[in-house]
Image (tube, helix red, strand yellow):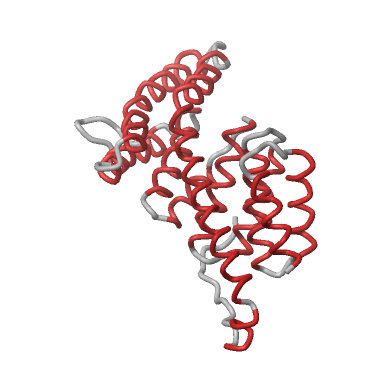
Amino acid sequence: MATYKRRGYKSKTNKQEQANQNQDSTTAEVFSSLDETASKTEQWVAKYQKYILASIVGVAVSTICFLGYSQYVLQPKEIEAANELYYPQQYFELALQDGTAKDSLLTLALYGGEGKYGFIDIIEEYSGTKAANMAEYGAGMASLNLKDYQNAISYLDGFSSDDAILGALAKGGVGDAFSQLDQYEDALEYYIAAFDHSDNSFTTPKFLYKAAVLAIELGQKSKAKSYIEEIKSNYPDSAEGQYAEALAAMLGA
């Protein structure tokens, strides 16, 4: 796991700032669109959380039906953990739908309420279960939304999934957290891991785009160019494909 220490950022001279004023303005606009894209990711996750949760819990329940310890200890634990996961999941979904009470609902999702477990309780009480793994994801995304970036990194990095969408979103979430901590090299590393995780029209162009923006900011122009070209060639109809030409122009400038 990458370290969480903040890294310094080299300041530019006044002369450089004046010479690159237009480019800096374009960079700011692209980073603004980067934030908007992250927001859309949150909305998508909220929309499909029930499907994601149901599919993973279904796998958890169906794959542990064997004799001995698994039948009498592990299987009941999995089912109990899956039932407990329902409550913080509901708080999480409500938080992404209700902006006025978002922070309060995310806190309930993390720590529980009304006698019910939160994501963190499930991680601690049901360690080793599929539900606890899903709770790592939920706790990481809740922490990311609460701007608790170091805990977001910790929880999302502890989550494991081969799912094409969910696995990529978790890695990309770590990248977003590192980016907010100004640890751009670490953020870029996780964005690369996110688009390498699977090839699909939703997450792949999204994280290629974020990787390209950071690569430009870090002066890694050859990397940025390759990411931009991949978006233009393979995902021209994606939302990120609409920004590819602007990124290419900024790279040329």
Q: Residue at x 39, y 39 (%)?
A: 124
Task: Report the side of 143 relative to 87 (left or right).
Answer: right
Q: Quadrant of residue 187?
A: bottom right
Q: Is residue 4 above or below residue 160?
A: below
Residue 86: % across, % down: 36, 24
Look at 72% across and 40% down and name the residue there.
236
- Residue furthest toward the front? 22
Residue 10, image x, y percentages:
59, 80
Question: In the figure, is residue 137 to the left or right of 202?
Answer: left
Left or right, residue 190 beside residue 229: left
Q: Which quadrant of the figure contains the N terminus?
A: bottom right
Q: Is residue 10 above or below residue 224?
A: below
Depth check: 234 or 203 in front? 234
20 versus 128 height, above or below? below
Q: Is residue 69 visible?
A: no
Q: Is residue 108 visible?
A: yes
Q: Quadrant of the C terminus?
A: bottom right
User: Image quarter for residue 93?
Assistant: top left
In this orientation, which residue lies closer to the viewer: 139 or 205?
Answer: 205
* Number of numbered labels in the structure image: 0
Q: Is residue 35 placed above or below 120 in the rendered structure?
A: below
Q: Position of residue 158 (x, y in %)?
A: 53, 44
Residue at 38%, 34% (x, y): give it: 122
Residue 7, position in %: x, y?
Answer: 55, 72
Instruction: Single out the residue that lies furthest toward the left.
Output: 114
| Residue occupying image coordinates x 45% and y 28% | 47
